[in-house]
Structure formats: structure tokens, C-alpha cells
Amino acid sequence: MAEATGNAPLIERIKARLGALGLSANAASEAAGLERTYIRNILNGRSRGPRGENAVRLAKVLDCSLEWLLGGEGEALDTRPGAENPADDIVLADHRVPARSEMPRDLPVLGAAAGARSETEGAVVMGGGPVEFLRRPSVLQGVSDAYVVYIVNDSMEPAFPHGEAACVHPHRPVKPGDNVVIQVRDETGDIYAYVKVLVRRTDADVVCRQHNPAREISFPRSSVVSIHKILSVSELIGF
């Protein structure tokens, strides 16, 4: 598969570090505690660039700064006498990231949460059975009512781009600043879901925020069915 245009600079930086270190893509992937084909899939354009802890692991193995790896900022390494590189201070967690094949495909997608208000409040009805099933991260093992929603517009970009899957843990406590799925019942009894940032809860309303365009939205507390936490990348990998 041809290299994805948007990833070409990242791919060139990875190739440069592999060459400088005399590492193969597969060997570097395994040294980082990732799937054997992880780097190869990036180089071939089969997957997007690294995120979260995977990016940290990759920078450590490639012996470069995280900023340079992801954005090409500065030099790969700061060669000034006594300089410390960001990756030098990173201690990788002593655990193995499960391979996709080891994750059961039983995590239900219950709907596609949208953003900006519309005639139906810009969200989808959450009733009915699962749309499909995705692989379940280990942190959600045993959480029988965990679920996924798809983001279907740009109201939460850049945090949640269109098409992103958001994993929801319905029993984690939520606090202001958390990304949440808020489910609201309308006057007909249908339940709609929104992906927003929780701002505050008052006796009368639940106030949330979206990013694009930036604004606050208030939901009458009497209509709110639930507020469920969306897990961050660090939470999904067990931190």
C-alpha cells in the first residue's frame, strides 16, 4: 500500500531513526513492547501515526524526542553538552500491551453520538440493540455494560474527530472537565446521546461544552438519564 500523504514526514523520520540505529521495523516494534508489525503498518500506510503511550514507547526505542518524532520539532536529539532528551526521563510501564487478536470482539457500539444542535438535538436514538461489536480493551474486561459511540460530526474536534470511536465506562465517576456521553430523554420518550465536556451540574441543569464551535450547552437536569465517562488513552491502557 502506498504511503499516506499526511504521514509521509512521520514515516521519513521513523525510517531515519531505524537506519541510524541499525534496527528493522519489526525488531523496533518488539523492543517497544508493541505488536511485531506495528511500525511496519505505519511505514506501509496501513495505520495512522502513534498515539498516547505507543508514541512514548516508539520515541524511547528510536532514541529520539517525542516532539521530534510526532511533529518534526527541533532535532531528533539535543546534542548540547549535558542536555537531557525528553525520552530519557520516560520509564516504560512493565507490562505488555495485548495484541488485537487477544481482545474479544464483544464491546457493543450502541449508537453514533453527534454534536451541534438540530431538530433532533444533533444526536442519535440510543434505543435498540448494538450496531456492531468492536474489540474490548483489557481495562473494560468484566464491565458488562461498557459500550462505544462513534463521533459523526466535527463539534468535538480536535479531541474527537469525525469517525472516532469513544469507549465509555458507565461506572467511572465523572467530574468537570471530563469527556462524557450524556444521554437525554426528550418529550416523546426517546433517548439521545451527546459527546461533550462536562462543565458543571446545578440543581436545574447539566452544563456541557463543545469545541467546534466553542460554546456551552445546558440540559435540563430532569431530562438527563445518565452521564457516562469516556475513557482517555491513558485510562484505556490501564493507567
Image: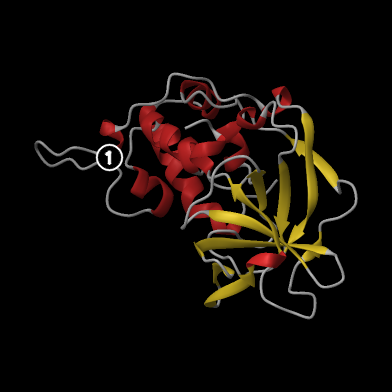
Left or right of 95, for residue 83: left
Q: Position of residue 215 (x, y in %)?
A: 52, 77
Residue of label 1 = 86
Say above or below: 45 vs 93. below
**Which of these two is toward me, 190 or 204?**
204
Give the image quarter of residue 120: bottom right
Q: Which residue is at the far bottom?
A: 119
Say above or below: 72 vs 211. above
Q: Position of residue 228 (x, y in %)?
A: 63, 50
Q: Residue at x 59, y 48 (%)?
A: 229
Task: Give SS at disc 1.
Answer: helix
Q: Which residue is at the far front?
A: 203
Say above or below: 192 vs 149. below
**Which of these two is toward me, 148 or 75?**
148
**Which of these two is toward me, 198 or 92?**
198
Q: Position of residue 221 (x, y in %)?
A: 64, 66
Type of amino acid under label 1: Pro
Q: Residue at x 21, y 43 (%)?
A: 78
**Which of these two is toward me, 107 or 203?**
203
Q: How many marks overall?
A: 1
Q: Position of residue 236 (x, y in %)?
A: 56, 37
Left or right of 188, for residue 195: left
Crowd class of label 1 (few under 14; some 14 to 19; many from 20; radius 10 Å): some
Q: Residue at x 41, y 37 (%)?
A: 56
Give the image quarter of residue 183: bottom right
Indicate the quadrant containing the N terminus: top left, top right, bottom left or bottom right: top right
